[in-house]
Image (spheres, grey):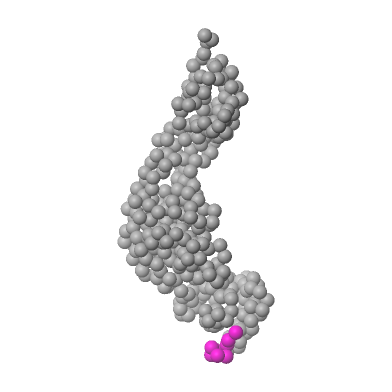
Amino acid sequence: MPFQAKFTDDDLISYLKKFGGDITTDQIRSFADSIGVQIQSVHKRMSKLPQFSKAGRGKWNLTLAQKLEQVYRAPASAPATVKYVPEKDPNYVPFGNSSSLKKIISSRLFYPVFITGLSGNGKTLGVEQTCAALGRELIRVNITIETDEDDLIGGFRLVNGDTVWHNGPVIEALNRGAILLLDEIDLASNKILCLQSILEGKGVFLKKIGKYVKPTAGFTVIATANTKGKGSDDGRFVGTNVLNEAFLERFPVTFEQDYPSASIETKILSNVGSDLQFAENLVKWAGVIRKTFFDGGVDEVITTRRLVHIVQAYKIFGDRLTAITNCVNRFDEDTKQSFLDLYTKVDAGENEEEDASI
């Protein structure tokens, strides 16, 4: 019987992992030859290790999930220096559902919230600034059609040649008792259903590392969307999807976010540097456009965010009409021109809605 050198599990894994996750017979034979053992001995050892699985004739898969306890303690996906409490925006003006949202967040109870409303009306900013005012940690995840379980829960990452587990943002929020903000959740695919148990307040089992993570006190979930999770029938929000009804049912409350009142919106624009006359004209202009939009007369709308952009553009270019033009250039030519003509009427003092109309 030929002499067979002893080798450890670590020797075997360290040698084969340089070939990646798919291991061939030739690579296994090269290891056997390098230490003077028969390839059958290597095969036998591999069959007993959880890191290896047979993938077909002469092929093996290597999953570097060994030493799960050590792997689980690997650094999280975000550096320890990250500040999770948002900075206060001195220009922010609370409105709409901000009072109710503040009550929910300050209660530190688990109470998922779904916030729906047209784009650019302060849904995300409202959540961020409420957390800032209360000193609550907030972890925001921007959802897309590509968002999957690894993006949310976590997964194995290659760090300095080693494969280690990194917590995803959901696990970070669970561990920290933070607010988890799922932004634009109606862009998600059915992969978002991996959050079902979390939305029930039960935590989640990390099957890849065999750990169960319970929510820390204070944890809750807030989701924002341009739709109510039923898709966009008018095609305005391309890419939004119909969300699973059972998933939506796990949000006990839904807030509908409207645009701020004229007085609040004027204050917002004044806070970001607009003079009072320009702010009032912009708000009046946007109000006429919004009414026409909701009546079905135009396909575009001027959001609060766009009004802020116009004020910022005015501070750069020093001309009101130039600022407005630059900020409505993305609309088709007819819409753009009708909006510019309307502002000219408003600026000229045609204050009555029937006079200043599109």
Question: x, y percentage for residue 182?
Answer: 46, 58
For the residue pair 264 and 234, the one nearer the viewer reads as 234
- Tell me if 357 is positioned left or right of 194 in this view: right
Residue 277 lies in quadrant: bottom right
Residue positioned most to the front: 57
- Residue 124 visible somewhere in the drawing: no
At horizontal 51% and vertical 75% (from top left) the residue drawn is 270
Question: x, y percentage for residue 180?
Answer: 42, 56
For the residue pair 333 and 252, the one nearer the viewer reads as 252
Residue 112 lies in quadrant: bottom left
For the residue pair 222 and 43, the one nearer the viewer reads as 43
Quadrant where the C terminus is found in the figure? bottom right
- Residue 232 visible somewhere in the drawing: yes
Q: Is residue 169 magenta?
A: no
Q: Is residue 259 above or below residue 1?
A: below
For the residue pair 258 and 25, the one nearer the viewer reads as 25
Question: x, y percentage for residue 302?
Answer: 56, 75
Question: x, y percentage for residue 163?
Answer: 51, 36
Q: Is residue 352 magenta?
A: yes
Residue positioned most to the top: 1
Q: Is residue 229 above or below residue 329?
A: above
Q: Which residues are magenta?
A: 351-358
